[in-house]
Amino acid sequence: MTQGMNYAPTPRTQRVACAPGEFCFAVAFMDHGHIFGMAQNLAQAGATCRKIYEPDTRKVAQISRLFPQAQIVGSFEDILQDPEIALVAAAAVPNLRAPIGMQVLNHGKDYFTDKTPFTSMEQLQLARDLCQKTGQKYAVCYSERLQNEAAEFAVELVRDGVIGDVIQVLGLGPHRLSRASRPEWFFDKTRYGGIICDIGSHQAEQYLTYTGETDARVTMARVANCANPDYPELEDFGEFSLLGANGASGYFRMDWFTPDGLRTWGDGRTTILGTRGFIECRKYIDLTVEPLRENNVYVVTPDGEEHHCVTGRIGFPFFPAFIEDCLQRTETAMTQEHCFKAAELCLQAQQLADQKGSIASDAGASMSL
């Protein structure tokens, strides 16, 4: 750290938004493991898990250990008809997330889904219309920000003007493929929506958050199957660029090429360039550093350089704010339009990549150029 600057965060405890039993939620459709983090973070912020619905008994046994007080029910309808349940948290197969959400909203409950929230623009428009009609919330767990302390600390630094006005956001979203553990739907594009639609949604949301942009256009998008010919509908590489209405740009890369030698599932990074400095978040690992160190934030300004490891110091502020929003019908944690705009941008980028068609690369890969 260079003398003369100190942007270290003040350690804080997770804020509790409500009294026990004041805000009840249900867990349903556990097709993606993200549901465990979503549910646990709601509970840590004060929410009470009241009911669980999931056809797979093994998954039910897993989550029941976390919420032994929750009732296991045999149908989703049981949750929809329970007047005590204010929110349904779900991580269904991606193309089913919107239809499930429509049921939830139509029963007067708020909905909290894993990303990606939609696999088509038609689903997005239906959700927009239904939110306006019902007044219910269609929230999305964009976890690479909402469940990452480095990313949330970067939000604070940007809002405090530490790096000046944001000019560009660079986002890298590598993931480990782990083919043997993936369900069938993971390799079916009609069900997962495409790589930009899926894990690119994290990047679109972070772009909007860090730049403060409310709209943007997709200037480039490309997807590819570079190394998995046995799974022709899998896109193992994707990239896209955005240009915001106020001039801030973004470039984002996502892939399924994390090597087995890395100690975690992916070296996710975000670099935010401003008019007086930059921030780099090394979210899940700082390469070669022992022991494994998550939530690294590097800050460089005219005053010097700093590194902060913020694990346990920031928490996940979205969750208590979201519970309060549901109780008070406010939009402090994330506005509905921001949530939907992030989904819209990744869908537009996926569409652009898909429209360009596939050709064979020199290496024999199928690429959308």
Image (tube, helix red, strand yellow):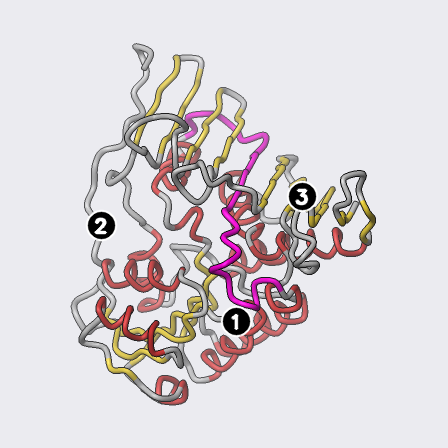
Q: Is residue 149 above or below residue 46?
A: above
Amino acid residing under circle 3:
Phe
Judged from the image, the secondary structure of the residue bearing numbered disc 2 is: loop
The x, y position of residue 347, in whole percent, is: 65, 57
**Crowding at mark 3 (Cα within 10 Å: few <14, some 14-19, many 20+):** many
The x, y position of residue 314, in whole percent, is: 28, 41
Instruction: Please give left or right for residue 84 compared with residue 363 in the image.
Output: left
Q: Per the image, is 97 magenta?
A: no
Q: In which quadrant is the C terminus drawn?
A: top right
The residue sitting at 58% across, 30% down in the picture is 167
The x, y position of residue 103, in whole percent, is: 49, 82
Judged from the image, the secondary structure of the residue bearing numbered disc 1 is: helix
In magenta, the rendered stretch is 161-187
CA gap, disc 2 and disc 1: 29 Å
- Mark 2 or mark 1, which has the lower sequence index? 2
Amino acid residing under circle 1:
Arg
- Mark 2 or mark 3, which has the lower sequence index? 2
Label drawn at residue 31: none
- Residue picked out by circle 1: 97
Q: Is residue 215 above or below residue 39?
A: above
- Residue picked out by circle 2: 14
- Residue picked out by circle 3: 240
